[in-house]
């Protein structure tokens, strides 16, 4: 059994012409939502073995907030340049590259790739608001097989609006 926690980064500050897109930080709401989602995941016992994160500041800050709430350390977060604004096929390739390593993986990245990958796995997942977490469980022994497998379980959790 493999479990994927597919996360869209939390709410970021608006674009600033003086700041590269990769350096946009989370805004106050984003920090609050990431901490709250981490607490909710922790209460469910949804702790990943590893967190894969885009190198963008907003994604990495989301990953760090989630990891903190889940009792993970910074060393449990692997920054992967391939996750920055990646298409769904690219996200899937990163996951499949894990082979049999890790039973539970959290991937923190960007839309539209995150929402499109979640929808590829589970048609009922049609959107992924900021800081939403899609939990997908696959009855496979290797990440290589998740592209051909329908999840045995699929659900989405998201921060409260407002």
Image (tube, rainbow, N blue to C red):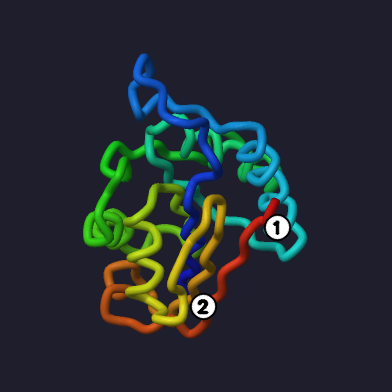
Q: Is residue 136 above or below residue 77?
A: below
Q: Where is residue 137 in the image (x, y as percent from the top left)?
A: 49, 75
Badge number at residue 40: none
Of residues 47 and 37, the one drawn nearer to the viewer in this rendering: 37
Q: Where is residue 46 in the image (x, y as percent from the top left)?
A: 64, 62
- Which residue is found at the position 62% from the left and 65% from the top? 157
Q: Is residue 48 above or below residue 67?
A: below
Image quarter of residue 69: top right
Image quarter of residue 61: top right
Query: What residue did someone put label 2 on?
Result: 154
Q: In this view, does 57 lie to the left or right of 17?
A: right
Q: Where is residue 109 in the image (x, y as percent from the top left)?
A: 41, 47
- Which residue is found at the position 70% from the left and 51% from the top? 162
Q: SS of the residue at dot 1?
A: loop
- Which residue is found at the position 22% from the left and 61% from the top? 89
The residue furthest top is 18
Front: mark 2 or 1? 1
Query: What residue did someone put label 1 on?
Result: 160
Crowding near the residue tagged with mark 2, few <14, some 14–19, many ≥20 C-alpha atoms within 10 Å: many
Q: SS of the residue at dot 2?
A: strand
- Say whether disc 2 or disc 1 marks the residue closer to the N-terminus: 2
Question: Distance between the Cα atoms at labels 2 and 1?
Answer: 20 Å
């Amino acid at each position: 059994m493999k479990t994927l926690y597919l996360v869209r980064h939390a709410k970021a500050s608006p674009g600033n012409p003086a700041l590269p897109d990769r350096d946009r930080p989370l805004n106050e709401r984003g920090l609050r939502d990431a901490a709250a989602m981490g607490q909710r995941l922790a209460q469910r016992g949804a702790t990943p073995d590893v967190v894969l994160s885009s190198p963008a500041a907003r994604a990495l800050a989301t990953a760090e907030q989630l990891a903190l709430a889940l009792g993970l350390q910074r060393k449990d977060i692997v920054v992967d340049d391939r996750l920055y604004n990646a298409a769904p096929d690219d996200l899937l390739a990163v996951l499949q590259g894990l082979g049999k390593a890790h039973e539970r993986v959290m991937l923190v990245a960007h839309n539209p790739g995150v929402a499109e990958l979640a929808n590829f796995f589970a048609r009922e997942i049609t959107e992924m608001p900021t800081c939403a977490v899609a939990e997908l469980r696959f009855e496979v022994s290797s990440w290589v097989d998740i592209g051909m497998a329908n999840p045995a379980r699929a659900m989405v959790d998201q921060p409260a609006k407002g």
